[in-house]
Amino acid sequence: MITEKFDIKVEGSLPGAALYTYIIDYSAELVVNERPLILLCPGGGYEWTSDREAEILALQFLAMGFNAAVLRYSVAPAVFPTALLELCEAMKIVKENAEKWHVLKDKIFVEGCSAGGHLAASLGVFWNKKWLSEKAGVANEVLKPAGMILCYPVITSGEYAHRGSFNALLKGIETEELLEEVSLEKQVTTDTPPAFIWHTFTDDAVPVENSIFFITELRKNKVNTEFHMYPVGGHGYSTAKLITKSPHGNEIQVECQNWLNQAEMWVNNVVNGNIK
């Protein structure tokens, strides 16, 4: 496995922003060497990036045969759009190294949990915006993800908002106009890439309405979406297995554990052209 760290610095970046890669080595013994890459954005309410949703989760995707990378993006006091620009920089790094790493250049997926889901979905809805390409210094097509994997994502800044995430993301710059812009269900278009989303009905931190509102707009815009709403479980479950259980939580939920298998099938369907 090839592991590298790339320091990331854009306007507003804080020390520690970096991309960590987990690349399966090329081997003449393997039939498959050209692989998709899953670019992970851990959650943490835009106040930290969770270890439980970073390397351990990346290794699950690696075991499926995908390359993976984890973005440790800037959080508070950094504000919008710093983390999004860092995600753009991460996309640029992956695409610049795609040939060396045997990454399928047009099959780079963004994955995010909770507030990291908001970041991943932000790239999904903003990738074709002129303001973003100008700030990122590349053509819009470079920023386009092949798809979005969103785990209990923060989406809406309205009634069902996870208010702490938006307070951290917009501290000192919050306006009604900006709150509207980062309420991502309002930014979906026909250019938004396909999505795999999961949430729990009983999530008591980020209500499932966040996913439902987003899915409703994806459906209106004919963006192919797979959605799993599990009947039980809280928030921040990551794998929902013992491997990602926190010292003070109870994030083991058997009902949710198959989301990784479902995501693997979904990614392969997108890669094979069965989902567009």
Image: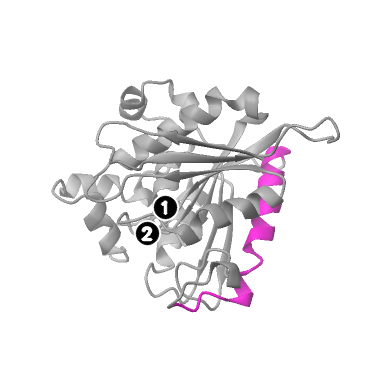
Q: Amino acid at mark 1?
A: Gly
First along the sequence among labels 2 and 1 = 2
Q: Which mark is residue 44?
A: 2
Q: Is residue 259 magenta?
A: yes
Which stretch did the figure color magenta?
249-273
Dot 2: what SS? loop
- Mainly helix, strand or loop, the magenta region? helix
Amino acid type, residue under disc 2 in the picture: Gly
Q: What residue sits 36% from the left and 49% below the top?
A: 184
Q: Quadrant of the N terminus?
A: top right
Q: Which residue is mark 1?
A: 116
Q: Quadrant of residue 241?
A: bottom right
Q: Note whether 129 is above or below 213 in the view shown.
A: above
* Spot occupied by residue 168 in the image (x, y as percentages of width and height): 24, 55
- Answer few, some or many: residues within 10 Å of disc 2's Cα (few below 14, many 20 plus, some between 14 and 19): many
Between 206 and 243, the residue placed more toward the observer is 243
Residue 241 appears in the picture as rendered? no
- Quadrant of the drawing holding the C terminus: top right
Q: Residue at x 22, y 57 (%)?
A: 167
